[in-house]
Image (cartoon, coloured by chain):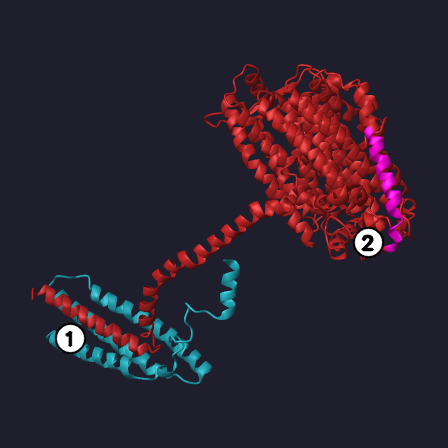
Chain colours: A red, B cyan
Amino acid sequence: MTTTTLAALVPLLPFLGAVAGLLLGRTAPGFVRPLAVLPPLASLVLAALVAARQGGGRAIDAYTLLTPTGSVPVDLALHIDGFAALVAVLVAFVATCVQIYSTGYLRDDPRYPSYAALVSLFTSAMLLVVYSGDLIVLLVGWEVMGICSYFLVGHYWGTPEARAASLKAFLVTKLGDLPFLIGLFALGTDAGSFRITRVLGAVASGGLDHPTVIALLLLAGVAGKSAQFPLHTWLPDAMAGPTPVSALIHAATMVAAGVYFVARLLPVFEASAAAMTVLAVMAAVTMLGSGLAALAQDDIKRVLAYSTIGQLGYMTGALAVGDRGAAVFHLLSHGAFKALLFLAGGAVIHAAGTNSLAAMSRMSHLRDRVPDAFWTMTVALLALAAIPPFSGFFSKESVLAAAERLATGHPGPAPGAAGWIVLVAALATALLTAAYATRLWLLAFRGRGAEAPDHGRQPLTMTVVLWVLALPSLAFGALAYRTLPGWFDGRSLAPTLLTSVLGTGLAVVGGLLAYGAWQRAAARAPRVPLGAVAAHPEGDAGLVEAEAIAAHEPAYGDIAQAPDPADPGRLLLGPLFGPAAAGFHLDAVYSALFVRPVLGAASLVRFLDREVVDTYVRGAAALPRLLGAAVRRAQTGNVQTYVSALLAGTVVLTVAVLLVASGA
Amino acid sequence: MHLAYPAVLAALLFCTGLYGVLARRNAILVLMSVELMLNAVNLNLVAFDVWLSRTAQDTLHSGQALALFTIAIAAAEIGIGLAIVLAVYRDRATADIDRLRDTAETPGDDPDHPDASGTEKAEATA
């Protein structure tokens, strides 16, 4: 088979798997699990084959006209360069891991068939985004992911949190998608084509008339999908979905799509210095804010969610300094260790029966209950905190080095100020990242108090996946940083001495700070007993998690924080703790700025419709109703009356006709 | 025979039938009155057919043919009519058409103001 055929099969297989899963889910439950696992696995093999054949060389382009539109045509196009080939491998890899893990995680879930099919559809949409060489086809995948995330986040629709979170995820990303759509049209019109190669060609020859407007419009969509400030608020709430979905959305698919899109169209953004500065500021605010917020979260998954936002901030930061190689490098390594963090977190939640770190910190021996999750999560947290030689260190260093190069005056595609903004924010975030990673590890695995409940070992499907994902988290960075430049733009991704020392030093300081705060605060823990566990700890992990999520707000009074004085984050953040736990009250601001005006407008429209428009309609019906009431009186039910009336009418008509005929 | 005799006889028969249809209360007698009216029409058909064929305007005797049709239809009609009356009698133990007023509009079933549950349903779908 040609490489093009193989590449076309990569997104197609999970799509067919999804369709078959949806059709057969009820009638043939025995096929559901193979149909869920095998298509992504086959896609992984094919994507790896495509990557091997592409080999970082010339981009593979193939296209066929999809539909003549009269103006700018829409093509069914493939554009596979080194970025696309490697990201596709990551997507297929994480999706396969998630599908295998889900067979254990949701093994008793009655809605598993539709869940698995939606995960497959989600994967297929992301692979379409990755391989597509046409912006409109890319948009199709982009939007399919949006609707799939709505369904998947809302999987536990029995809980109000999940319902609200799925709606919020959908609406917030759509808020960004509208400018994105307009930006795509503007880009297509300016460049005369939706094909990525032609768009890039037009940019290179200076053919864009409004680069700043287009770049900013596109950035809105990217901010929505990649959960960047100010459209990031959907992502922490999306934790109300099942853990494998969080892993899928936050590691390799949905949030990666935004970063990947910018990486692919980076020359368009580089054409506008203003857009690059906005990107840098967005990345800096996102990184710092999410780092602070992550330090204050009580839900273990919300900590990871904010850390995702922060790591995506690193990627957008790398893009803002014009180094997409570093951005995609971090995307790849982050995809592996973040998927691992979520999947291990799911095992921990299952074992502990709660998603609250405050409750876990009052359980001892939790790590003995889930040894696989403990060890793999330790690896992943070290990677997250960018401690050498774990993979996160190398990718984060490549981002820092790129920012440092630009900041110290090397000529680059972006203004030098962007380099400074990104560099300072990234270094500060390195400290915060290490601090919250340490806090998470200490609270979850070094708890003191009653012994954690023992529910037996986790299913093999869940633990094996963790170890599979631990390998790239451990070694991917060190192995890849020399070879990856050949796949990307050719710029070196090797760590530089200055930033390595600074970044690692700050990370160690952050970790030590968190440890010190934990030791000081832990003394207060026994005085305040806390803890609520799921009602059915014997159930499958999905059930336990749904109950834990539903129980958090009634038990602790808030979805994001717990009234725990022993929380080291409370000591580190001081007065900032409350606002940070609430995501700096951004939701309240949005609620006042957007939600309430929209609700007010909706009730106004309702009033206008019910009371004003309907009045006219009812008024128009009044006369016919009166006439009808009058005529109805003639309906006596007596046949003879009817016949009499008929006779009378006939006589009258006959007389009239006779009179007219006789000319009277 | 002059045309006036059958015509007057037919008119008398028709008026008798009409009176029966409008005034009788027993459904069977109403049906019989309908038969009278039909027969008055038959009489007219035959009489005018003879009159027209005598003046050689119509040689096909279409009036007589039509009379045969009418008789056939009247037979079918009375069969069905009597069957309905029988069914109604078995059901209601009466054939008095003054008391068979099920199709009457009563003030209670006003379609514009359905009962409360219907209103709620309309609200829910709105």
Residue A412 horizontal side relative to residue A364, left or right: left
Q: Nearer the viewer, residue A579 or A36?
A: A579
Element carrying mark 2:
loop
Residue A139 horizontal side relative to residue A33, left or right: left
Q: Residues within 10 Å of mark 2 (few under 14, many from 20)?
A: some
Residue A254 position within the rendered picture, expressed as x and y whole percent measured from the top left: 67, 36
Which is the main secondary structure of the residues drawn in magenta?
Answer: helix
On whether residue A152 falls in the magenta region, the answer is no
Q: Nearer the viewer, residue A104 or A301?
A: A301
- Please state the chain letter of the residue tagged with numbered disc 1 in the rendered image: B
Q: Nearer the viewer, residue A55 or A485?
A: A485
Residue A426 position within the rendered picture, expressed as x and y whole percent measured from the top left: 74, 29
Q: Nearer the viewer, residue A611 or A504?
A: A504
Residue A21 horizontal side relative to residue B105, left or right: right
CA distance for labels 1 and 2: 97 Å
Q: Amino acid at mark 1?
A: Ala
State the residue at coordinates (91%, 52%).
Answer: A449
Q: Magenta segment range?
A: A506-527
Q: Is residue A522 above or below residue A320?
A: below
> Does any portion of residue A55 appear in the rendered image?
no
Q: Quadrant of the N terminus of chain B?
A: bottom left
Q: Are marks 1 and 2 in contact (CB under 8 Å)?
A: no
Read off the residue under disc 1: B7
Residue A553 position within the rendered picture, expressed as x and y whole percent measured from the top left: 73, 54
Residue A227 numbered tag: none
Nearer the observer, disc 1 or disc 2?
A: 2
Q: Residues within 10 Å of mark 1 (few under 14, many from 20)?
A: some
Name which quarter of the figure residue A633 lies in.
bottom left
Q: Amino acid at mark 2?
A: Gly
